């Protein structure tokens, strides 16, 4: 059944686990996420970014998720809109049947420029008032996602121009967070604690403290009843990076957030863990590997390589459900 984010995260908090929120834009991702959830009995959060809605079209996305609900009636599913840039966008998703929306007011509507507290709390409260009247959950974000190592906001390809942030913007201010939650009444709060979007998070192998866990502890002490969301939570699997690069790819050496550090974050109130890059890397690696295999040189049925991609993604989903503790809670 479709449920709201609030229903799921309240339950997760009671039972001390977190739920991976996977980005979806195609059927293979939906299959992989659901097959893994079915196997380990986990609830599911599927989220669609603006890019996903542009790629698939909103009706296709919605119906793929509804098809998943129909095929797996025993698994609770949240249909979440990721990174809404404005109240208008969020309202459209509420009307079209999403059970949860993110109003990302940490950035201006261009989604590039950091905003101020007043702008952020105003647009987020606008969305929360409307969403709650419709029985839909709301995620807000306070602070700017960015690597504490590089001070950069994160980027998709590791080469383009990237915005530099100062250190104070990279960590959610605890007193502001209290005020933000009070003003907006969000159901979940995305916090900045050292993660960034995309594959290029860290240039050095993580040493065990890439996240600002002590900062997260402070946030939780001030907001013990707030569900925290960690964006940019891909672990950037080194095995898939290697497979991509040994099968014709050329991705720079880069590192993600170790799963163990996410698990540490779950002890301090993280309940939703956003993952997109890991599934992209697994599917690209699996497809490259399949198509360059000597034995498959005459193959031209896309179902063959898409199946390999689905399998690769499924393995990662299953590992995350297990590691974050949502397995067994469907
Ligand atoms: O938050 C970012 C997600 O990874 C979505 O990325 O805008 O390329 O779909 P996208
Ligand atoms: P990754 O790029 O680390 O997968 O993060 C995805 C995300 O935060 C989507 O909102
Ligand atoms: Na989100
Ligand atoms: Zn994000």
Image (cartoon, grey):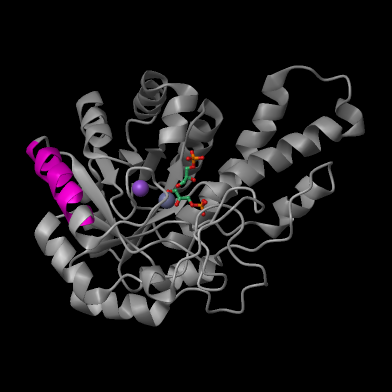
124 within the magenta span: yes
Coordinates of residue 244 in the picture (x, y in percent): 76, 46
Could you say where residue 107 lies in the image, as x and y percent from the top left?
34, 52
Q: Which SS type dominates the magenta stretch?
A: helix
Q: Is residue 239 above or below residue 66?
A: below
| Residue 46, quarter of the rendered image | top left
121, 72: nearer the viewer: 121
* Residue at the (47%, 36%) spot, across then down: 24
The structure residue drawn at horizontal position 82% and vertical position 20%, both measured from the top left corner, is 299
* Range shown magenta: 120-133
Vertical comparison of 175 with 160: above or below: below
Above or below residue 71? Residue 247 is below
Q: Is residue 250 left or right of residue 111?
A: right
Task: Please state the total of marks drawn on the protein image.
Answer: 0
Judge from the rendering whether residue 307 lies leftward or rightward of residue 111; answer left or right: right
Could you say which is closer to the camera, residue 263 or residue 147? 147
Q: Nearer the viewer, residue 50 or 305?
A: 50
Identify which residue is drawn at 65% across, 53% down.
Answer: 158
Tell me if I can see residue 46 in this picture. yes
Residue that sits furthest to the right in the current view: 294
Q: Residue at x 79, y 34 (%)?
A: 290
Query: In the displayed structure, would residue 75 be above or below residue 212?
Result: above
Q: Quadrant of residue 309?
A: top right
Residue 206 forms part of the magenta stretch: no
Task: Let me know if residue 224 appears in the view.
Answer: no
Q: Report x, y in % for residue 291.
A: 81, 30
- In the rendered image, residue 84, in percent from the top left (x then y), is placed at 32, 41
Position of the N terminus, as image quadrant, is top left
Q: Is residue 201 left or right of residue 135?
A: right
């Amino acid at each position: 059944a479709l449920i709201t984010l609030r229903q799921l995260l309240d339950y997760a908090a009671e039972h001390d686990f977190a739920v991976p929120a996977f980005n979806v834009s195609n059927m293979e991702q939906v299959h992989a996420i659901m097959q893994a959830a079915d196997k380990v009995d986990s609830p599911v959060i599927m989220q669609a970014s603006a890019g996903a809605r542009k790629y698939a079209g909103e009706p296709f996305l919605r119906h793929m998720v509804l098809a998943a609900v129909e095929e797996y009636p025993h698994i609770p599913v949240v249909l979440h809109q990721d990174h809404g840039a404005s109240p208008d966008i969020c309202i459209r998703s509420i009307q079209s049947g999403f059970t949860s929306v993110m109003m990302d007011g940490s950035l201006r509507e261009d989604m590039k420029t950091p905003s101020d507290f007043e702008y952020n709390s105003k647009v987020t409260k606008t969305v929360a008032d409307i969403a709650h009247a419709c029985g839909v959950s709301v995620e807000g974000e306070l602070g700017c996602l960015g690597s504490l190592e590089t001070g950069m906001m994160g980027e998709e390809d590791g080469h383009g121009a990237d915005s530099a942030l100062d250190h104070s913007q990279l960590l959610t201010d605890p007193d502001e967070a209290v005020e933000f939650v009070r003003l907006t009444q969000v159901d979940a709060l995305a916090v900045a604690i050292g993660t960034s979007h995309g594959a290029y998070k860290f240039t050095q192998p993580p040493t065990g403290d890439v996240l600002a866990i002590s900062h997260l502890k402070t946030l939780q002490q001030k907001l013990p009843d707030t569900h925290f969301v960690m964006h940019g939570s891909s672990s950037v699997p080194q095995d898939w990076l290697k497979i991509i690069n040994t099968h014709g790819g050329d991705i720079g050496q880069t590192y993600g957030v170790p799963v163990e550090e996410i698990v540490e974050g779950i002890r301090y109130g993280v309940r939703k863990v956003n993952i997109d890059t890991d599934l992209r890397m697994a599917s690209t690696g699996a497809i490259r590997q399949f198509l360059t295999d000597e034995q498959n040189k005459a193959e031209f049925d896309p179902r063959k390589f898409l199946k390999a991609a689905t399998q690769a993604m499924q393995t990662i989903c299953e590992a995350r459900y297990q590691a974050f503790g949502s397995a067994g809670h469907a």
